[in-house]
Amino acid sequence: MIYKFTSLRSSDYLSDKRIRLVLWILMALLFLAHLPFLNADPDSLLSLNTRGAWTDEGLYTAQLRDFINHGSFDLYNNNGFIITPVLQIILFPFYYIFGTDIIVGRAVTLLFTIGVLFVLSASTQLRLPALFYLLLVALQFHYFQFCHYSMGEIFAINMLLLSLFAMIKFEEFIGHPKKLRWLLLAVFFSFLAYGVKIQFAYVAVLVPAAMLIKAWSVPRKLKTIRKEYYTAFGISVIFTFTLALVYLVVWYLPNQDFYNYIMNYETSERFKNTIPGLLQVYRFNFRHIIWVPELWPLLLITLFALIGLTVAKLSNFRKQSIPLALIFGLIWLVVEQHKIAMNYLPTRYFLSLIAAAGIVVSLSLGLLVKNYASAIKTILPVIFIIAVWNLTFVYQALHRRTFDIEAVQTYLENSSLDGKSPVLGIWAYTLAAESKAPTIGIRYNYLNDKDPIRTYKPKLVIAEFNQAESDSAWARQGIDLAAISDSVRRFKVWRYDLDFYWIRP
């Protein structure tokens, strides 16, 4: 007889059919809520300490655009493909078919996010938690905004949510041969998460660690079941190392020198080198970046969920195994804490922390409803109050929209750019994305900074008035952009004054 594990099923108070209907309606409304933002600038209050999506949205797809538009691919003129190889592979067919405009990537990001929510809703165990997740996380200001930017973080998070779904299916099929395929899928989606963006490499531990802790949590009298999970742990470790080896052999080793060069630059001085220093940065980031009104409700309800889980486990110690999905979520939440100690913490870096907290809360509330059906009468009003709180920030962002990027792109469409001569500058990645011209970023002592005018023969250079985005790459080489230009046009984009230098042929 197969042991029936506790699961996160819907209560009788809310039938699966009703939950599914509500989820579908909310997913449709969520999709519609994103549409007004698809052609707008990134929100002006989203990334206060970094240029964020304003430049990076174009940066991560510049090499892909050049390959599609010109048939040329240069791995070494950009760090995008080194950092986000799987993201480029995912976007390739859509850019190839629908064109290389940034709005295409944004639409793919949004549809993928909605699609993952739809997949979660297909699981009976995840249906109610998926509803909570949509209201708590998908509507949260920071997370909502990045769901319509074509960047790696949301893609990686979605891969981890699919990994969670696969683990739920594995637990459903425990004791059945089908469980192996779901276990391998769980590991594979975790692999895709760090393939989308290598900074997520730490998530490789999630599936094996969850399997090991699950095995420990199963009562000792259930020896057969414990053995199943220990076996699953061993298989997940082997498959995780196999995929990591594939990444090593296929991607890292052939590009080792450039890869190390990029990663050394990108990760240098990210953390203080002393414990007191780490704690100081952690406290600062938590107080000023994490503990903000847009995140207050989620942080507080996460704290209550963690306290509730601790009390429930202590009062029922070893009598009932912990659901595998909840173990996965808790480990994910723990490993995300390291990001708060980073010296440099842009908004996109803590999106996965938001997602992990939301998963823990959603699964905890789902478990509470399963055990105490009447709890839904208290939980739903609290969830909807938080959802309304989240929507107030989305509503404010709607009225705060700007279209500076679109204005510049229209200007460049009507300019003399021929689509062949490159446009230089970090801002060119985004601003010249629709011009079909090759775009090459310039940063001093990092990328493409050695005599760029003679090397690339650009028709246009875009630089901030003080050249801060390139670490003064032009001024440090004695290049007077104004002197070698036919004309200069200044645009105000967000909080930056950008000079457009049209270079003499």
Image (tube, rainbow, N blue to C red):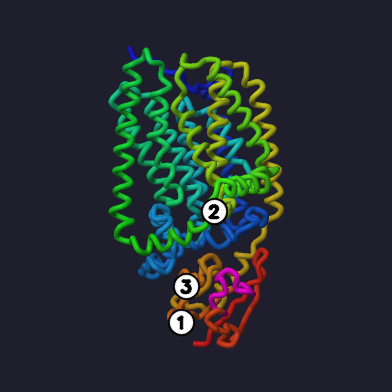
* Secondary element at image label 3: loop
Question: Height in image: 245 above or below 321?
Answer: below
Q: CA distance from mark 3 to mark 1?
A: 13 Å
Q: Callout 3: few (<14), some (14-19), or many (20+) C-alpha neighbours within 10 Å?
A: many
Which quadrant is the N terminus positioned in?
Answer: top left
Distance CA(mark 2)–CA(mark 1): 31 Å
Tag 3 and tag 1, C-beta contact below 8 Å: no
**Residue 292 x/y as whole percent:** 68, 44
Confirm whether the magenta stretch covers residue 400. Answer: no
Which badge, 3 or 1, is on the more N-terminal residue?
A: 3
Residue tagged by mark 2?
Answer: 149
Name the spot of residue 495 as percent of width and height, x first: 68, 64
Which residue is label 1 attached to?
457
Q: Which residue is mark 3?
A: 437
Determine which quarter of the picture holds residue 128: top right
Magenta range is 464-475
Identify which amino acid the numbered label 2 is placed on.
Tyr
